[in-house]
Image (tube, grey):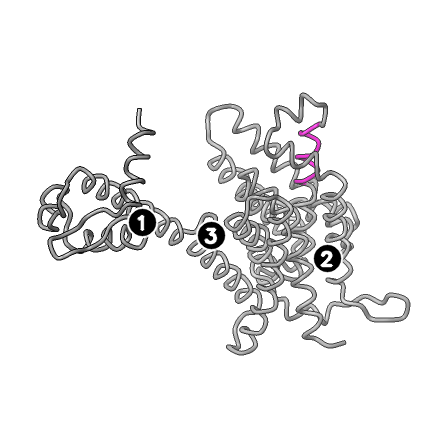
Amino acid sequence: MNADLVIILTAILVSTASALVGSFLVLRRMALLSDAISHAVLPGIVLAYWLSGGERATVPALLGAAAAGLVTVVLVEWLTRTGKVKNDAAIGIVFPALFSLGVLAVSLFFRNVHLDMDAVLYGEIAYAPFNTLNLWGREVPESWLVMGSLTLLNLLFVLLFYKELKLSTFDPGLAAALGLAPGALHYGLMTLVSFTSVGAFQSVGAILIVAFLIIPPATAYLLTRRLPVMIALAVGVGVVSSLAGYALAIWLDASIAGMMATVAGLCFTLAFLFSPVEGYLTARLRRERQRLEVAARLLVAHLAHHSQPVPEREVLEEFGWNPRFLKQVREKARQAGWLEVVREGLRPTARGLAMSSARLELSP
């Protein structure tokens, strides 16, 4: 089977599964919890390995990881509710403790088990084509089966409980009053986050799974305020990051997982700067346009009180503007048809006088 296809499709499945549940994590302001879960599942995996008699089976590992993920969520919420520590501090306390517990258990009771930090923390998606299962006489990548199943499971969960998830995300009080069990939905979502995290460990590692859980949904959040569009955009950003990241990694001979995370970060940077909804530069340009428009209206209102054209020197003295800003304001007002420039200075047009008088009539 084509190795490029295996790697790309594995990354797309991981990013899609992550975007489906990660969108709700971002909206619930629980993005950091995904990092905690992705590390804290290790003791659950170790426990599942022990209960299964030392068999390195995927299903027990998923179940153990889900249990550890739920324990993480419960402990974080319990510490937060005590009022002694804030949510971020609770996360910082719980996940290192659980991850350390898992490492300690491996070192004490499973010395013959090799804990590959490249696989657990960084991941090596390039090995995905070599990890296969025999399915009906054909060798199929294990990552396709695992992540394909998890993607389908996450999609079904979102489709079946979309209205409930939406309401409990934005108004949990109303959801509880309507009997929608927001607590059960919350823990169901956390279970899927745990499943998705551990399912992607062997293929992409914890760092990339955290990147896919957070960055594409955060990018989509900057681009839209509609939940269905946000989820679709998050999936799209994940797919683009997978494709472009793989292509750049091959071109630059760099880490595939690292390049995919980098491309996702670049997508977020572009959205942060240029998004029409929440972009930093877009917002600055919008504020600058508003500032110029307010100044232009103020200038025209000032000119309307004079029967003769007003020299620009007097305008500068009146408002304390610098010549460059006055030029920008003058051009803004002239383009709007509110004033005209004559030899004696500036004077309002009929349209400018009408605008100024209408503004005065609306003033209290």
* Badge number at residue 276: 3
| x and y percentages locating residue 221 in the rendered image | 53, 47
In this view, 11 is above or below 193: below
Count of numbered tags:
3
Mark 1 to mark 3 CA distance (whole Å): 15 Å
Q: Residues within 10 Å of mark 2 (few under 14, many from 20)?
A: many
In this view, 203 is above or below 105: below
- Please name the amino acid that badge 3 sits on: Pro
In this view, 30 is above or below 112: above
Residue at (61%, 24%) from the top-left corner?
173
Give the extent of the magenta segment: 181-190
Provide the secondary structure element on which disc 2 rests: helix
Q: Toward the viewer: 121 or 251?
A: 251
Dot 1 or dot 3: first in sequence order is 3
| x and y percentages locating residue 279 in the rendered image | 43, 51
* Badge number at residue 288: 1
Q: Residues within 10 Å of mark 3 (few under 14, many from 20)?
A: some
The quadrant where residue 64 appears: top right
| x and y percentages locating residue 110 in the rendered image | 67, 52
The quadrant where residue 189 appears: top right
On the rendered structure, is 356 left or right of 46? left
For the residues bearing labels 1 and 3, Cβ distance under 8 angstroms? no
- Please name the amino acid that badge 1 sits on: Glu
Q: Toward the viewer: 181 or 209?
A: 181
Dot 2 or dot 1: first in sequence order is 2
Q: Quadrant of the C terminus?
A: top left
